[in-house]
Amino acid sequence: MKHLQPPGWATPKGYANGVAARGTMVFVGGQIGWNGAQQFESDDFIAQTRQTLLNIREVLACAGAGPEHMVRMTWYIVDRVEYNARLRELGGVYREVMGKHFPAMTCVQVAALVEARAQVEIEVTAVLPD
C-alpha cells in the first residue's frame, strides 16, 4: 500500500489524498451506529460513530483484514456542524478503534439516512496484500 501525496501539497490531517494498493479487495457496506442486534444504544453522534467503526472492524475481520488494510472510507453524516464542532472527540474515537491508519476519505452531509436514528453511515474498501 502506498499513500499518494503530490509534491508541494500540504499533508492532510486524518486522511490520505489517495492510496495505491494491490491484492484482494474487501468491500464493507454502509455501517451505522447500532450493535450486532441492530439496536441503537445511543443517539449521540460520537457514540454512534464509535459503534460504526467497531462494526467496520468486525466486518473487516471476517475477511482476515483490519483497519490497516483500509484504502478508502466514505462517511455520510446528517449534521456537518456537529461533525466539525466535535472533530477532536471524533479523532480520539477514530484512533481508539482504527489506530493511526488514515485511508483516502470522503465525508458528505446527507438530508437523512435510511435508519431514522442513525447519525452516521460509513462504507469502506480495503485491500489485503497478495
Image (cartoon, helix red, strand yellow):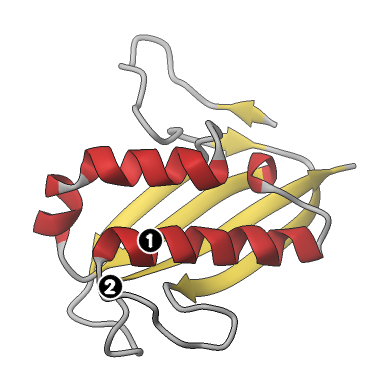
* Residue 114 point in image, percent of width and height: 34, 89
Circle nearer the N terminus (2, 1):
1
Please, what is the three-letter code of the amino acid marked with disc 2?
Gln
What is the secondary structure assignment of the residue under circle 1? helix
Q: Quadrant of residue 101?
A: top right
Picture residue at 70% right of the left edge, 60% below the top: 60
Q: Estimate how packed mark 1 is, as few (under 14), some (14 to 19) or many (20 or more) residues with alpha carbons within 10 Å.
A: many
Picture residue at 83% right of the left edge, 55% below the top: 64
Q: Is residue 32 left or right of residue 114?
A: right
Residue contact at pointers 2 and 1, CB within 8 angstroms: yes
Q: Quadrant of residue 76?
A: bottom left
Residue at image mark 1? 49
Q: Is residue 54 left or right of residue 45?
A: right
* Residue 67 point in image, percent of width and height: 63, 46
What is the secondary structure assignment of the residue under circle 2? loop
Picture residue at 23% right of the left edge, 82% below the top: 112
Residue located farthest toward the top when viewing the structure as drawn: 8
Badge number at residue 41 = none
Please, what is the three-letter code of the amino acid marked with disc 1?
Thr
Q: Estimate how packed mark 2 is, as few (under 14), some (14 to 19) or many (20 or more) residues with alpha carbons within 10 Å.
A: many
Residue at image mark 2? 119
Q: Is residue 36 left or right of residue 113?
A: right
Q: CA distance from mark 2 to mark 1?
A: 8 Å
The vertical placement of 1 against 48, above or below, is above
